[in-house]
Image (spheres, grey):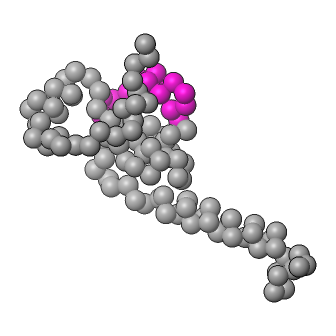
Amino acid sequence: MSALLLGFDLPALLLGVAAALIVTLVLMSRGQTPANLPPFPGRRVPIFGHLLLLGSEAREKLLEIRKTTGDIFSMYLGGTLFIVLSGLDVLKEALVKQGDVFVDRPVGGLSSVLKVKS
C-alpha cells in the first residue's frame, strides 16, 4: 500500500489529527472551573492537571503551595478536582464542627502518595 491514502499524505493526516486533539483538550480544560473554588497553585496542564507540579516530593511541594495560597487550596490531579485542607484550625473546623459534611467521603489514591516515609 502506498503512503497516499485516498489522496492524503498519511504522516500529514496523523499530524493534523494529533493537533486537533491537542487543541480540543486545551479548549475543554478552560472554562470548566467554578468561580467559588479556593485558589489554585498555578495553571493546570490538560490531562495531567497540577500533577506535574508536585513531582517526586509531593509532601514538600504541598507545603510550599500552602505558604503561597493559604490553608485551603484547589488542585486538579489528572482530571479530578481536589480541595486541599491543611493547618490545625482549618482541619478542626472541617472535621469537628462540620463533620457531617465530610461523612462517607471516599479515600482517594492521593493518600498513598502522601504517606510519611519510614
Q: Nearer the viewer, residue 36 or 24?
A: 24
Note whether residue 69 is visible: no
Q: Is residue 51 above or below residue 114?
A: below
Residue shown at 47% from the left, 27% from the top = 58
Left or right of residue 68: residue 87? left
Q: Magenta region: which residues? A: 53-72
Residue 10 x/y as whole percent:
82, 73
Q: Is residue 118 above or below residue 113?
A: above
Residue shown at 44% from the left, 52% from the top = 79
Left or right of residue 106: residue 81? right
Task: Please tell me in which quadrant of the rendered image residue 73 appears.
Answer: top left
Note whether residue 103 is visible: yes
Task: Please tell me in which quadrant of the rendered image residue 70 appears.
Answer: top left
Residue furthest right in the image = 2
Q: Is residue 6 above or below residue 55?
A: below
Q: Does 65 lie within the magenta span?
A: yes
Residue furthest front in the image = 1
Q: Nearer the viewer, residue 5 or 90?
A: 5
Left or right of residue 38: residue 7? right
The C terminus: image quadrant: top left
Residue 101 x/y as whole percent:
14, 43
Residue 80 x/y as whole percent:
40, 49
Q: Main secondary structure of the magenta part?
A: helix
Residue shown at 52% from the left, 47% from the top = 48
Q: Nearer the viewer, residue 3 or 60?
A: 3
